[in-house]
């Protein structure tokens, strides 16, 4: 079964082009129990949830900001477990999504519960009180009524677009509203890609064959150069990922290296070049040895 995963990157470096520290910090068993007990004492309604397998967040000035496209709220979260694995704090549970009948305040649950995990990468040892407060206040609503009141149906977020290397085009992200012509910049146009994506030797040795995808987020600046390039959906979080943590990091680094070689004709607005946020899904594939 595929587990939708919400990724929170708790590092202030995410928007500066720097990458996460190579060694993630560990939490004690006491810390994990504190997080679990604090989240178990209230109704949890997710403020966002994945449209595919990952929703990325970045810590910006102490607050969590979405880095990739997601839908807003409306998922009642049931906590199952809190654990740490390969540098990620994983808050494991399930969610029941609710929808509102158009033009009414009637809330109806979708069929069944879906498994979901909140995966939080920690680049430094967090202040536990602040971490718990941030999790509860910024990631959850107290009730479905509060969630629907805060998130009108016609105001779904639609900031990043996705670049498709296969189609060599910028595609509208899922569930996005189309901005008005007056306010929308013309998106960037790829003029140079990074060439063939290099399969890291460690991955070849461990896998033999397989296919993996790493999502990299970045901003195309006014000169058409990618900046603030960082991994938004690391290889390790691919469902049923069976390679080592080191191999996963090699895939992440190879994806970032490829994206840094991209060059674009910059986005234009009112006749002037402007910066433009994008993400790209970098595909790795080994057919056979």
Image (cartoon, rainbow, N blue to C red):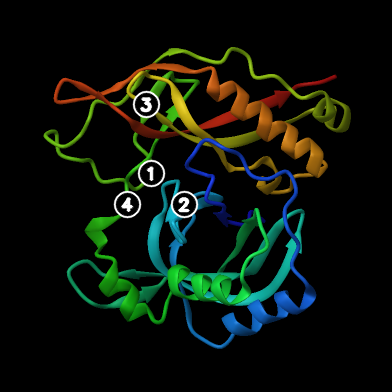
Above-or-below relation of 111 to 8: below
| Labelled pair 2, 4 in contact (Cβ < 8 Å) | no
> Mark 1 and mark 2 in contact (Cβ < 8 Å)?
yes
Count of picture labels: 4
The quadrant in which residue 18 appears is top right
Find out whether the residues at labels 1 and 3 contact each other: C-beta distance under 8 Å: no
Comes first in the chain, label 1 or label 3: 1
Label placed on residue 51: 2
In percent of width and height, residue 24 lies at: 72, 53
**Crowd band around label 2 with a 10 angstrom C-alpha radius: few (<14), some (14–19), many (20+):** some
Of the image marks 1 and 4, the number of the one nearer the N terminus:
4
Which residue has dot 4 on it? Answer: 157
Instruction: Provide the secondary structure element on which disc 3 rests.
Output: loop
Q: Nearer the viewer, residue 239 or 138?
A: 138
Q: What percent of the width, then of the height, locates residue 161?
A: 37, 36
Q: Earlier in the sequence, mark 3 or mark 4?
A: 4
Which is more foreground, mark 2 or mark 4?
4
User: Which of marks 4 and 2 precedes in the sequence?
Assistant: 2
* Residues packed near mark 1 inside 10 Å, few (<14), some (14 to 19) or many (20 plus): some
**Residue beneath disc 3:** 221
* Rendered view: 11 above or below 137: above
Q: Residue at x 42, y 52 (%)?
A: 70
Q: Is residue 265 above or below residue 141?
A: above
**The C terminus lies in quadrant:** top right
Q: Is residue 146 left or right of residue 32?
A: left
């Amino acid at each position: 079964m595929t587990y939708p995963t919400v990724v929170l990157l708790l590092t202030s470096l995410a928007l500066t082009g720097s990458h996460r520290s190579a060694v993630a910090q560990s939490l004690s068993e006491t810390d994990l129990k504190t997080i679990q007990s604090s989240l178990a004492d209230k109704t949890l309604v997710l403020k966002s949830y994945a449209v595919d397998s990952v929703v990325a967040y970045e810590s910006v000035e102490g607050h969590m900001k979405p880095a990739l496209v997601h839908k807003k709220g409306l998922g009642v979260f049931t906590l199952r477990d809190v654990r740490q694995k390969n540098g990620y704090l994983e808050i494991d549970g399930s969610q029941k999504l609710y929808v509102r009948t158009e033009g009414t305040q009637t809330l109806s649950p979708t069929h069944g519960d879906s498994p979901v995990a909140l995966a939080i990468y920690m680049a430094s040892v967090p202040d536990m009180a602040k971490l718990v407060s941030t999790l509860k206040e910024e990631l959850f609503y107290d009730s479905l009524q509060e969630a629907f009141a805060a998130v009108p149906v016609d105001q779904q977020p639609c900031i990043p677009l996705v670049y498709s290397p296969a189609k060599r085009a910028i595609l509208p992200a899922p569930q996005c509203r189309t901005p008005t012509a007056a306010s929308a910049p013309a998106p960037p146009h790829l003029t140079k890609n990074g060439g063939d994506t290099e399969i890291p030797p460690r991955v070849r040795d461990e896998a033999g064959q397989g296919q993996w995808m790493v999502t990299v987020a970045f901003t195309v600046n006014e000169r058409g150069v990618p900046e603030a390039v960082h991994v938004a959906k690391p290889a390790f979080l691919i469902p049923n990922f069976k390679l080592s943590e080191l191999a996963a990091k090699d895939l992440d680094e190879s994806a970032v290296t490829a994206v840094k070689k991209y060059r674009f004709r910059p986005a234009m607005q009112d006749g002037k070049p402007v910066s433009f946020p994008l993400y790209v899904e970098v595909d790795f594939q080994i057919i056979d040895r």
